[in-house]
Amino acid sequence: MRHLLSTGDLDRDAAVLILDTAAQMAATQSREIKKLPTLRGRTVVNLFFEDSTRTRISFETAAKRLSADVINFSAKGSSVSKGESLKDTALTLQAMGADAVVIRHQASGAPHVLARSGWVDGAVVNAGDGTHQHPTQALLDAYTIRRHLVGGAGASDPAGRDLDGLHVAIVGDVLHSRVARSNVQLLTTLGARVTLVAPPTLVPVGVQQWPCDVSYHLDPVLADGAPDAVMMLRVQRERMGAGTSAGGFFPTPLEYTRNYGLDQRRLDLLPDHAVVMHPGPMNRGLEISADAADSPRAVIVEQVANGVAVRMAVLYLLLAGETHEERTGIA
Amino acid sequence: MSGSTRYVLRGVAPLGGDPVDLLLADGVIAAAGRGDIQAALDRDAAAGSPVVEVDGAGLVALPGLVDLHTHLREPGREDAETVGSGTRAAALGGFTAVHAMANTSPVADTAGVVEQVWRLGRDAGWVDVHPVGAVSIGLDGEHLAELGAMAASAARVRVFSDDGRCVHDPVLMRRALEYVKAFDGVVAQHAQEPRLTVGAQMHEGVVSAELGLTGWPAVAEEAIIARDVLLAEHVGSRLHVCHLSTAGSVELIRWAKSRGIDVTAEVTPHHLLLTDELARDYDPVYKVNPPLRTQADVDAVRDGLADGTIDIVATDHAPHTREDKDCEWAAAAMGMTGLETALSVVQETMVETGRMTWADVARVLSEAPARIGRVTDHGRPLTVGEPANLTLVDPAARTTVVPERQGTASVNSPFRGRELPGRVVATFLRGRATVLDGHAVPAPSATAPASGEVR
């Protein structure tokens, strides 16, 4: 693995390796001394063109637990407006000797451009690009699902196992969701079945080619589909065209909540073992009620903790085991 | 004209037919056939003008190509292209006339700007430049520009377009269609419903869904075409549809023509060959407007071109600076160069597939665009007495596209590294060789002012 750009680039074995490695990382995190010396002397740059305190802190924590030096480079502001270009930013980081660049960008494909361009030598990790991919989010979701629903259900890590036979419902703004795209690819690669649930306006044209089912109705999916996990997507208010006369994707937030919000009544439709997930940050009262968010089925806080372990695993697999010389040919 | 070089083209195949010798002298095809040419040369031996023989064995002679859709970028974006560099590229591509689109800075919406572009073209001397006039002032889509003044100017504008933007207001479109009838003009529509394409990045479909790029749906093009052909029918006007790109658009044009509506349509070389699958690497060299579509659309526009539903191939040559393409997809400019690859792409997609003859190529790349643009001395038959505007093509040659070696000042060719058939060996503009042996030949007396310089 040279870069992590898309979950579509991962085959089953590669994905399982990341999950298994994450489990080993997680095991170290219950120790008194959480820090590992693995990436000492290596530099990880968090290059964030878009605000995301959560994801940045998660990557930063992961890198620091592996003893890497971390540089946070907040290049906020629209790249489409003429600030410093992605290219010049990348060349600057390269000059500073970044071994890995963790990039969050509002433009879909920006990490691919970075990886393809030759502007940086280091590994590129996609930390969310536009409405395209957010692979580490999908990996932490898969890790969370595996821990709860595969093997001993949390008793011990089911190393080597995938998600064969599980059913996951992903509910909400699929159209704009990089989390949904990443999860559809990864979860199906791992053997799970995915059902997307959304109003038709929030399902992309072309979705019929995706390896999943699509439903416009949440209740039957919960009641009859018996999903093992329900993943609620954040409704991106800023993408709703709110306040405009046309172009909004649904009539009102109330109607959205009525049809697609996860509340106590819908929670009761689920099988007993099913877990409730959300990538955060949540709009309580919109896509998820407080009852659902705070219920014992919710593993939302655990997802955050698992995010650190998964990102440790990704950085470890990308950076450890190959030296600077091996990568660049320069001793 | 005495003293100007005369050319004897030995054994060229007009429209791919039987080989013949042609004499180009005094700006026209002066004689054909070995005997007549010798007689003509003997008669004028005293004139003393040099005679150059061109070995035309294996070469197809076509009337000089006419592009109805070129962005020369001057005035305003001389960093991407000038009239000089763009028309040199045109000559290298086999063109003898181009229509320069109006979306310059300032916009070509007055007689002054169109005359400036026209003069720059004349002074550079590579091809005849026919400026396209903007339909609306500043391409704002609100107020008609002074179409009459542009038509009456030295540039004699006959094609009007807000290309880059759609004339989306139906009333403005109706007025424009009606108004240009007074001087036999045509409105060339960039068919793009703006509300359906806010922030659009690529064709809306399977690939955009996966890549997370905002979609540019086919219906946004088709809805405007449907409206416009009905408007053209209602007011009895002539309509031209720019860069048609979808299967549905082909159906609409076919239907409109079957009703007798006076509509013509163009397709670009890139829409004949490339698909939206190329966006998967997020390389913005494939970002263009209208976007690359699906293979089904490519098949449909090829069908439409072969059966005459689509009248012409036009390049939509759109040079951009490196910085406008060396970035993330969403930040990149839309457009790709095409003047120097158009003929090769048509050969690859239409001739080598057996769907068109060289006579058909002459029709879609020269005769029909000249007729639509009301350019009278291009797109003519290759017969004695006709203007000597022609190009010689070696159809057996195959070359790999290297944008840095092209005549255009920009390198945003989507065909980089691709091997394409056909090579333009020579181009003649009123008997003057603008290209010989595949190399550009500057006009000896080019009165080029500063801005007419080529790189």
Image (cartoon, coloured by chain):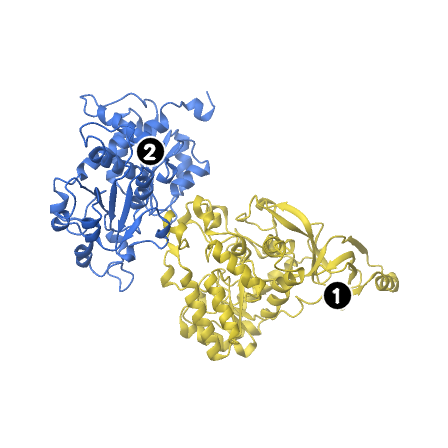
Colour used to depict chain B in the structure image = yellow
Closer to the camera in the image, A97 or A161: A161
Q: In this view, does B202 lie above or below B366?
A: above
Q: Name the chain under label 1.
A: B
Closer to the camera in the image, B110 or B238: B238
Question: Residue A69, percent across and down?
Answer: 31, 27
Residue flagged by tag 1: what amino acid is it?
Answer: Val
Closer to the camera in the image, A209 or A96: A209
Where residue A201 sits, quadrant-wise, is: bottom left
Q: Residue B28 carries which label?
A: 1
For numbered disc 2, what is the local secondary structure?
helix
For numbered disc 1, what is the local secondary structure?
strand
Q: Which mark is residue A237?
A: none
Residue drawn at point x = 41 percent, y = 39 percent: A114
Residue drawn at point x = 45 percent, y = 68 percent: B225
Q: Which chain corresponds to the colour blue?
A: A
Residue marked by disc 2: A15
Residue flagged by tag 2: what amino acid is it?
Answer: Ala
Q: Is residue A244 found left or right of B407 in the rendered image? A: left
Q: Is residue B436 found left or right of A27 in the rendered image? A: right
Q: Is residue B55 found left or right of B263 in the rendered image? A: right
Q: In this view, does B354 lie above or below A138?
A: below
Question: Residue B420, percent across and down?
Answer: 61, 48
Residue B440 visible somewhere in the drawing: no
Question: Residue B253, percent across and down?
Answer: 50, 68
Which quadrant is home to the N terminus of chain B?
A: bottom right
Q: Name the chain under label 2.
A: A
Q: Bin the neighbour count of mark 2 within 10 Å (Cα to Cα): few under 14, some 14-19, many 20 and up.
A: many
Q: Bin the neighbour count of mark 1 within 10 Å (Cα to Cα): few under 14, some 14-19, many 20 and up.
A: many
CA gap between label 2 and label 1 equals 71 Å
